[in-house]
Amino acid sequence: MAAVLANPIARRLLRIPPSYFVFLVLLATLWIARPNMLNLNIMGIFVRQIVPLGILVLGQLVVMRVKSIDLSGGGIILLINYFISSGTFPGASMPFFVVLALATGLVIGLFNGFMIGSRRVSAVIVTLAVSIILVGLVQFLSSGNPPGDVPKLFNDLYNTKFLSVPTPVLFWVLLTALVWLLLSRTVFGRYVASVGENAEAAHFSGVPVQRTVILAHTLAGLIAAIAALVQTGSIAVGSVRVGLDLPILAVAATILGGVVFGRGDGGVWGPFFGALCFALLFVVMTVLGIDEPGKLIAQGVIILGAAIFYGVRVRNS
Amino acid sequence: MHRSLFNILSGRNTRQGLWGLPLLVALLISLWLTVETTQFATAENLFNLVAQAMPLIIAAIGQLVVVLIGGLDLSVGSVISFTTAVLALDQPAIVLIPAVFVLAALIGLINGLAITRFNVHPIIATLSTQYIVLGITRILRPVSGGTVPEIVIDAVSGSFLGIPYPVFWGIIVILAAWKLLYGSRYGLHLFAIGGGISSGAESAARNFGVSDRRNIILAYVVCSCFAAVAGVFLAGRIVSGDPNVGLLFELDTVTAVALGGTQLSGGIGSLHGTVIGALVMALLANGMNLANVSPFVQTAIKGGILLAVVGLQSRKKMGL
């Protein structure tokens, strides 16, 4: 096995994020099983469904590049959904909700960043605990029942199309391009890359390691808030369960996309295709009649498989 | 070898970590409950408390073994649910009970191998198995139901000389864990490996002839087996299989371990601290139930405690 991995062609192939291969395999499976489903309209609907996940992935990949993780997205989505649907702010306009959501995400992200960057608490524990607190709070405030309705404008915007492509999908591509620019063309992007490579070396080279980690988490909180707005638009009602499985899916998509704790081979588009893989995976599983438990197993196997793929490679390089 | 009370309370200069403070907290909560309520300080409620705390105590001890080597096992909750689901499969007990432990050991083995052989981060490895095991559990038992073997139910619900069986479960598990951690070569190796990892010298133990890989794999196997014991206990209590009974249990175990003064970076911690940590959690739950606090708020408060105890631990490493 070691000899195979030392082969130059094999090593070249191992550099490509697994998400591209998985995407092609799933596409081929779908093409064989249901060729008539592969048209722009149907695919547009499926891809539109995972836009909240795709946006959350953008935040996840930034924090994973600095060797951290953010599992608080579920709590943030639930809280913002509650703000919008509960009628706590009667007669509020859409811009107000957008600002409120972004501020919420910013504050939670900043808190995560402070705890992880300054207090040096384990990122998994902090973000999971934050998520649990937020979920408990929302369920208490709504007594466990779905809160209420979402202003109609959210869903109307979500349902628009531009040149027969759903607007949420375009919005996702645009945001991905922005994050790509941020990571590849700005000083912050360089800082993120160097902290991920080696935090100690970065520190001694004058990179503000702590500030970079805090900023990365703040950005992740902000992006989670955007994901929450899109998710709220998509379901158009209040819910006490929405988005709870998204953070873990986001981790899976990011790892699948070639970004693993400090290693950024997949860039931004690897995880983008990682999220697309999940869109296809859900379609394929629905077509094959595999339900929820099967999806849980698939998520676990994908995360473990992709992580082993990288673990083996690190040891051989 | 003089050790002042302050040193015990602050956990300074010890391998045991800070465990005096949580003991104080436990005593204070008990005192408050005794004064505030009439039901608390009755034998019935106290025995009930032990039975309620037992799954957490058992699973937290398993978690402690993994935390001591600087790891974390997030699959504990799923293993517990899985164990109850397997026990409710309507087969003879003589098949089911060994099967439960073999399967749990297998899950631990997968965790350990992924971490040591394939270089996967413990959190990622155990997060994956958490989902895989949860999925399998939901296939076995989509909703709670079925009945567990009679012998399992009897083992937790009877009493001997007026003392309910759960008390004996606790004594046996704690004695076994004591022997493992403080009375065996393996326990010494765990502290050695963890101490090396937490101070950044990951090969320190190996350099002194302690096989770190094998011991780390074994730690995850031990952790899963303790989770299975907790699962068997819980199955006896609820009499059926429940795919959601272990939900978020892994976080409760981490909270209990951290509350007991064990450093999550590894190498520093104690069995008695962990047991006290689990007792504090159980006392809090008992108190909040007596005070009629909403279950949703209880979850939020538990999250807050987790954040607080872990936030108070200082460590060098940033990130995961």
Image: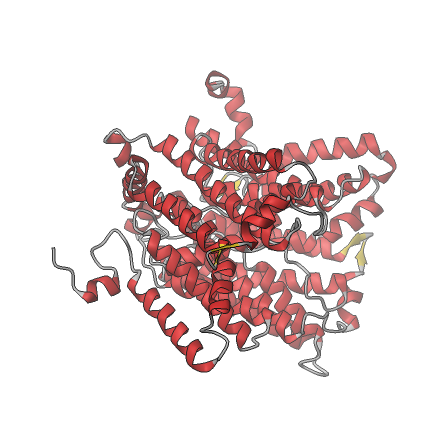
- B176 or A90: which is nearer to us? B176
Q: Is residue A234 left or right of residue A67?
A: right
- Could you tell me which quadrant the N terminus of chain B lies in? bottom left
Residue at x 49% of width, y 64% of height: B49
- Residue A193 shows in this picture: no
Residue at x 53% of width, y 28% of height: A14
Q: Measured along the vertical axis of the image, is residue B103 above or below residue B298? A: above
Q: Is residue B2 left or right of residue B280?
A: left
Q: Position of residue A287 (x, y in %)?
A: 81, 39
Residue furthest to the right in view is: A36
Q: Position of residue A125 (x, y in %)?
A: 46, 56
Residue at x 65% of width, y 36% of height: B92
- Residue B271 shows in this picture: yes
Q: Position of residue B251 (x, y in %)?
A: 50, 56
Residue furthest to the front in view is: B161
Q: Position of residue A269 (x, y in %)?
A: 60, 43
Q: Is residue A192 left or right of residue B239?
A: left
